């Protein structure tokens, strides 16, 4: 019987696993000695299979785990942005309502004795205005960031 590369290729997994008889092992060794190019190809295939078999995690599972972790991180960040935007919106609305009530009731910053009549009252109102403007801009930035993240 003539031994061909196909025969050796069929025997190779059992040879690698050590499940062949002594005669078959001698046959494969003799053929590989006569065809060193094919022997190097088979050894490379065996090394690659061994690496895949010994790998603790399949390559697809690693990618899947990374995708799930990325999605979880994105969801957490999205919820944190939403919570911060809602809290800041409530704070800005309450502060604006407080300023409005102070103006209407004339008991706060806008009263004749405390308000815009004096230079000190003007500077107090300027500080309050700039603080409120900063809060509104920060709130708008949070909502913008949330909407960008929600779109993907």
Image: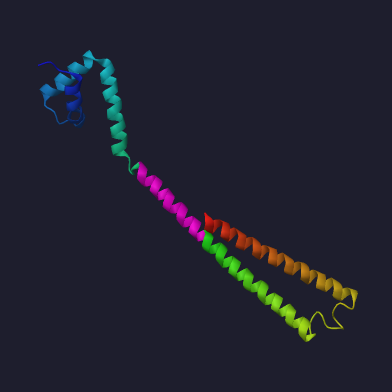
Please state if 130 lies on the left or on the right of 36 as rendered.
Answer: right
Tell me residue 50's x, y (percent). Answer: 28, 34
- Span of residues in magenta: 59-76
Q: Nearer the viewer, residue 52 or 100?
A: 100
Q: Main secondary structure of the magenta part?
A: helix
Residue 20: image quadrant is top left
Q: Does 60 lie within the magenta span?
A: yes
Residue 145: image quadrant is bottom right
Please state if 22 lies on the left or on the right of 40 as rendered.
Answer: left
Q: Does 12 lie within the magenta span?
A: no
Instruction: Residue at 29%, 28% (x, y): give it.
Output: 45
Tell me residue 14's x, y (percent). Answer: 17, 30
Instruction: Residue at 11%, 22% (x, y): give it.
Output: 23
Image quarter of the N terminus: top left
Please state if 25 lies on the left or on the right of 83 as rendered.
Answer: left
Q: How many marks?
A: 0
Q: Residue furthest right?
A: 118
């Amino acid at each position: 019987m003539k031994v061909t590369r196909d025969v050796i290729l069929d025997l190779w997994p059992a040879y690698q696993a050590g499940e062949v008889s002594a005669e078959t092992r001698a046959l494969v060794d003799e053929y590989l000695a006569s065809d060193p190019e094919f022997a190097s190809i088979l050894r490379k295939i065996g090394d690659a299979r061994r690496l895949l078999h010994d790998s603790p995690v399949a390559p697809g599972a690693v990618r899947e785990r990374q995708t799930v972790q990325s999605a979880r991180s994105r969801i957490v960040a999205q919820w944190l942005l939403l919570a911060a935007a809602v809290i800041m919106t409530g704070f800005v609305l309450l502060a604006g309502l407080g300023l409005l009530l102070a103006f209407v009731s004339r008991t706060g910053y806008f009263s004749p004795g405390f308000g815009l009549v004096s230079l000190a009252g003007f500077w107090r109102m300027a500080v309050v205005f700039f603080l409120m403007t900063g809060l509104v801009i920060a709130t708008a930035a949070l909502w913008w960031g949330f909407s960008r993240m929600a779109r993907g």
